[in-house]
Amino acid sequence: MKRFTWIALLVLVLTFIVALVSFLTSRSSKKPQLVRLQVLFALLWSLLIISFEFRRVPKYGSQWWRLFGFFFLVTISHGVLDAMTDGGLGVAFFAPFDRGRYFFAWRPIAVSPIGVGSFFSHWGAAVLLNEIQYVWAPLSLIWFIASILRRNFA
């Protein structure tokens, strides 16, 4: 189980790095814009993780599909949360097939400041409190309920 947790955390970190590189290069006039292929990337990344890290799991069995769904959701969640922020350029969910950038109608998450000085400021503290309210508290509640249900029904 520890290996699975580390792989899931690695997926989250790598997805954040891809998003950060995309953000930084999209604002640069000297570098080409790096378009994040949200859905396609999530599909391919999930397949890659399962293919290399879970080779013993029978292909296309129920456990394989659960792993695929989990890693797909972990990967796509960053773009979904980005689409719920109150700033930025929007998310290119369907690039390169659609040049549009999207936000959701409900955008409660405050956009995070970029840079160490800005992050450790009043604005950064307000953003962290906002993320606790709209991201971490609901996810913690879901995790808590899921762990209770797993214990009771396992």
Image: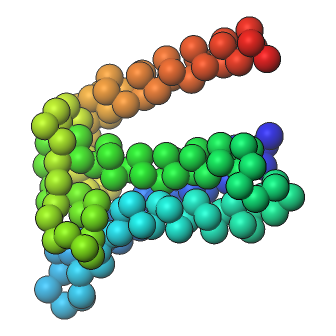
Q: Position of residue 138 (x, y in %)?
A: 41, 22
- The residue positioned 17% from the left and 54% from the top of the image is 102
Q: Position of residue 53 (x, y in %)?
A: 76, 62
- The residue positioned 72% from the left and 66% from the top of the image is 51
The relative height of residue 24 versus residue 3 in the rendered view (above or below) is below
The relative height of residue 110 versus residue 140 in the rendered view (above or below) is below
Horizontal placement of 140 versus 100: left or right?
Answer: right
- Considering the image in quadrants, where does the N terminus appear? top right
Horizontal placement of 54 versus 28: left or right?
Answer: right
- Considering the image in quadrants, where does the C terminus appear? top right
Quarter occupied by residue 23: bottom left
- The residue positioned 27% from the left and 76% from the top of the image is 96
Q: Position of residue 144 (x, y in %)?
A: 58, 17
Task: Pick whichever, 37 or 16, lies toward us.
Answer: 37
Farthest residue, direction bottom: 30
The relative height of residue 131 versus residue 14 in the rendered view (above or below) is above
- The residue positioned 66% from the left and 13% from the top of the image is 149
The relative height of residue 110 versus residue 11 in the rendered view (above or below) is above
Farthest residue, direction right: 56
Horizontal placement of 118 versus 79: left or right?
Answer: left
Q: Position of residue 132 (x, y in %)?
A: 36, 27
